[in-house]
Image (cartoon, helix red, strand yellow):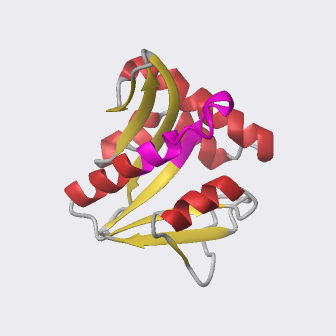
Amino acid sequence: MDVRVISYDPRYRAEFASLNYEWIETFFEIEPEDRKALDNPEGYALAKGGQIFFVLEGDDAVGTVAMVPVSGTATIELAKMAVRPDRQGRGYSRLLMDACIDFARGSGAEEIMLVSNDSLGPAMGLYHATGFIQSAQYQDPRYVRGNVEMRLQL
């Protein structure tokens, strides 16, 4: 099977939303910030100079992630990473993470930040394995479910 990571393609717009809605609804509840991002990915990430990546198996999008510049800073937020449940454990999240790090470096960012929940064991493992360090205090009010902020210095 041909597996590759591509930059945003509007043909996969619906998958950006559906893949993320699926995992969020499995573990948490959809929040207003989720809807803003998932219902308007172009405005959420691309219009701000960010990017959305997809992992494709053949022509099927089985994973996705967004990179969203944080206004007025040299920071890019890694957000909305999702891999289809029946495709997890194949290294696809790592492929997406590598694309995100390459994108951030290429854009001149100094760091990548993310918001997560410490109950998401595989995600937390990926973040630690790629060098993210947990911030001492969580201060992001956008998500009720968020309880961890992590940063990767580039």
Q: Position of residue 38 (x, y in %)?
A: 55, 36
Residue at horizontal 34%, vertical 56%? 101
Give the magenta-colored segment's residue range. 80-97
Residue at horizontal 47%, vertical 71%? 151
Q: Position of residue 31 (x, y in %)?
A: 70, 47
Asked if the magenta segment contains residue 94, the reply would be yes
Residue 107 in sight from this viewpoint: no
Q: Position of residue 137 (x, y in %)?
A: 62, 82
User: Could you say which is closer to the camera, residue 125 or residue 75?
Assistant: 125
* Residue 23, placed above or below residue 101: above
Residue at horizontal 29%, vertical 71%? 110
Image label count? 0
User: Could you say which is closer to the camera, residue 71 or residue 7?
Assistant: 7
* Residue 122, placed above or below residue 118: above
Quarter of the image where one finds residue 144: bottom right
Asked if the magenta segment contains residue 84, the reply would be yes
Quarter of the image where one finds residue 96: top left
Quarter placement of the N terminus:
top left
Quarter of the image where one finds residue 4: top left
From this viewpoint, which residue is outermost toward the bottom? 136
Q: Position of residue 107 (x, y in %)?
A: 22, 56
Residue at horizontal 61%, vertical 75%? 139
Position of 32 with respect to 17 (left or right) is right
Residue 111 in sight from this viewpoint: yes
Quarter placement of the C terminus:
bottom left
User: Could you say which is closer to the camera, residue 28 or residue 88?
Assistant: 88
User: Could you say which is closer to the camera, residue 12 or residue 154?
Assistant: 154
